[in-house]
Image (tube, rainbow, N blue to C red):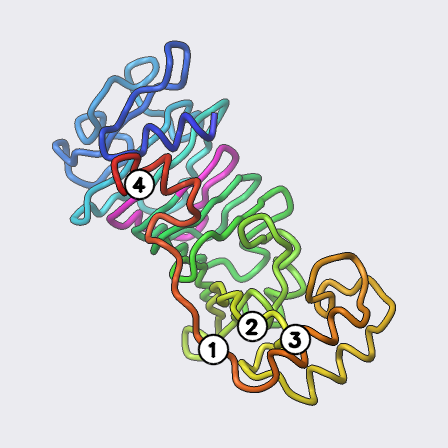
């Protein structure tokens, strides 16, 4: 289903094989903002209308000028079956409290999605896709999984400070399938005047920088020696399952300031680039 979704999201908007979920592309030709106005979407919704409590379609937004919203006040997008949201551009706005995305999937290569929380949802962020969460009490509840595939993608927590994110959410987040580790492959910065936290991906160009200060020095060596003989995810530089002489050799070989490496493509990981933009060289 994911591969089919990615192909739907390509420049040609290729259709899934027969039997796949209905795909609706945002046009804004209705009232220009409401999710539930069928006139804003190309294609015919299942049953002829869009029910926020039971969205079985794949909603695709690929318009830099799009400002997609919905009813003000309490309103949640409940995706059912193979339904989900694909965002390449534009903004999916939040019009009040108690506005969430529940179940289904969220796939982004660009644009911005503003919600109070995202629950029981499979999320993949690539390119410049960002999520803004306003909830201050577990805005990524258990059952949500987020995979980040680009250093320019990320999540802005308006009311969760870095410590809260580490304790409550880091176990739900991965970086191209690898465990998210603050300071190693995840950067957490103060946001929203110190009330919140911005989460993004650190470039994996300096794996021996164990404490994430962009320099390999005595502090990192102390962390490695303290984890000697263990299977520490942080200090196991070569990823062979234990901390030993091989990791020490890699650390000494990269001693000093880290070198800034290239960013990932806009569409994220190479496999997703191929699926999203098959005509690119």
The Cα–Cα distance between marks 2 and 1, rounded to whole angstroms, is: 7 Å
Q: Quadrant of residue 183?
A: bottom right
Q: Is residue 89 left or right of residue 140?
A: left
- Depth check, mark 3 against mark 1: the one in front is 1
Q: Are marks 3 and 1 in contact (CB under 8 Å)?
A: no
User: In the rendered structure, which disc, 2 or 1, sits on the residue that comes first in sequence?
Assistant: 2
**Residue 93 point in image, percent of width and height:** 30, 50
Rendered-image quadrant of the C terminus: top left
The Cα–Cα distance between marks 2 and 3, rounded to whole angstroms, is: 9 Å
Question: Badge 2 is on which residue?
Answer: 206
Q: Is residue 136 left or right of residue 263?
A: right
**Residue 231 point in image, percent of width and height:** 81, 62
- Depth check, mark 2 against mark 3: the one in front is 2
Label drawn at residue 259: 1
Question: Badge 3 is on which residue?
Answer: 210
Residue at the spot 35% in from the left edge and 48% down from the top edge: 267
Q: How many numbered circles are shown?
A: 4
Question: Badge 4 is on which residue?
Answer: 71
Q: Give yes or no for residue 90 being in the magenta stretch.
A: yes
Q: Which residues are magenta?
A: 88-107
């Amino acid at each position: 289903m994911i591969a089919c979704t990615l192909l739907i999201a390509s420049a040609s908007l290729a259709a899934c094989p027969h039997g796949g979920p209905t795909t609706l592309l945002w046009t804004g030709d209705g009232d220009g903002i409401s999710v539930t106005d069928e006139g804003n979407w190309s294609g015919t919704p299942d049953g002829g209308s869009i029910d926020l409590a039971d969205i079985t379609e794949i909603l695709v937004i690929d318009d830099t000028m799009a400002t997609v919203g919905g009813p003000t006040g309490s309103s949640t997008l409940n995706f059912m079956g193979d339904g989900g949201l694909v965002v390449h551009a534009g903004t999916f706005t939040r019009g009040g409290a108690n506005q969430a995305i529940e179940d289904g999937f969220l796939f982004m290569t660009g644009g911005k999605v503003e919600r109070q929380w995202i629950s029981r949802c499979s999320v993949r962020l690539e390119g410049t896709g960002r999520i803004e969460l306003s909830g201050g009490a577990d805005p990524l509840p258990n059952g949500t999984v987020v995979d980040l595939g680009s250093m320019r993608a990320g999540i802005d927590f308006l009311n969760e400070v870095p410590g809260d994110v580490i304790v409550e959410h880091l176990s739900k987040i991965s970086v191209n399938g690898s465990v998210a580790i603050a300071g190693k492959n995840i950067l957490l910065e103060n946001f929203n005047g110190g009330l919140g936290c911005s989460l993004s991906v650190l470039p994996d160009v300096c794996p021996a920088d164990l404490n994430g200060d962009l320099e390999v020095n005595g502090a990192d060596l102390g962390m490695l020696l303290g984890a000697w003989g263990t299977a520490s995810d942080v200090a196991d530089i070569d990823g062979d399952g234990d901390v030993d002489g091989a990791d020490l050799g890699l650390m000494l070989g990269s001693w000093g300031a880290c070198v800034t490496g290239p960013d990932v493509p806009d569409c994220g990981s190479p496999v997703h680039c191929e699926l999203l933009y098959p005509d690119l060289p």
